[in-house]
């Protein structure tokens, strides 16, 4: 009898742990998106990142939609396999033919928004073209 109670307790704890783990994955996935999108409107930080992309002329090399150019990488596919930390290190410190932007105050201050904008584009959540800021 004691063994059955113990086994039932173990099964119950295992089920509870699995449920808790599944719930944490769901909430983590939602929390990981660094952007909020409704149509072509985005949160303030992401909007600032989009403006920074335009203002700093990132499109000169990476194209107006971040899909790359003849000799420059497509940021949408690149961000699918790049962590936020690697993205920031690449932008700030440069890599291969990309110059470093760690001396550019606007880029240093706006790197979180720039990542949010490009990650949203990479995830397919943010459309190409003009964006608006969410109210």
Image (tube, rainbow, N blue to C red):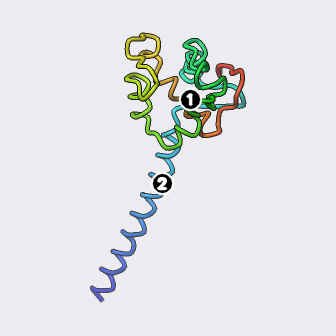
Mark 1, Cα crowd under 10 Å, few <14 / some 14-19 / many 20+, is some
User: What SS does tag 1 mark?
Assistant: loop
Q: Quick one: 124 or 15, which is closer to the camera? A: 124
Q: Quick one: 2 or 64, which is closer to the camera? A: 64
Residue shown at the point (65%, 32%) measured from the top left: 126
Q: Alpha-carbon distance for marks 1 and 2?
A: 40 Å
Residue shown at the point (30%, 89%) measured from the top left: 1
User: What SS does tag 2 mark?
Assistant: helix
- Circle nearer the N terminus (1, 2): 2
User: Is 112 situated above or below 56?
Assistant: below
Residue shown at the point (56%, 29%) measured from the top left: 72
Point out residue 88 in the picture as x, y percentages from the top left corner: 42, 28
Badge nearest the viewer, 1 or 2: 1
Point out residue 125 in the picture as x, y percentages from the top left corner: 64, 37
- Outermost residue, front direction? 71
Q: Quick one: 62 or 10, which is closer to the camera? A: 62
Q: Is residue 55 left or right of residue 82?
A: right
Point out residue 86 in the picture as x, y percentages from the top left corner: 40, 34
- Outermost residue, bottom direction? 1
User: Is 122 situated above or below 101?
Assistant: below
Q: Is residue 109 left or right of residue 68?
A: left
Residue shown at the point (46%, 39%) measured from the top left: 82
The residue that mark 1 highlights is 72
Residue 14 falls in which quadrant of the image? bottom left
Point out residue 36 in the picture as x, y percentages from the top left corner: 59, 31
User: Is 81 situated above or below 40?
Assistant: below
The residue that mark 2 highlights is 23
């Amino acid at each position: 009898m004691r063994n059955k109670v113990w086994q039932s307790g173990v099964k119950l704890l295992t089920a509870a742990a699995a449920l808790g783990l599944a719930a944490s994955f769901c909430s983590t996935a939602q929390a990981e998106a660094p952007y909020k999108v409704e149509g072509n409107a985005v949160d303030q930080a992401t909007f600032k990142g989009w403006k920074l992309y335009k203002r700093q002329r990132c499109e000169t090399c990476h194209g107006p939609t971040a899909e790359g150019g003849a000799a420059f990488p497509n940021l949408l596919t690149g961000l699918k396999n790049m962590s936020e930390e690697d993205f920031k290190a690449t932008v700030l410190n440069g890599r291969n033919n990309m110059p470093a932007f760690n001396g550019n105050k606007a880029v240093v201050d706006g790197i979180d928004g720039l990542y949010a904008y490009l990650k949203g584009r990479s995830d397919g959540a943010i459309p190409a073209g003009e964006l608006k800021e969410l109210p």
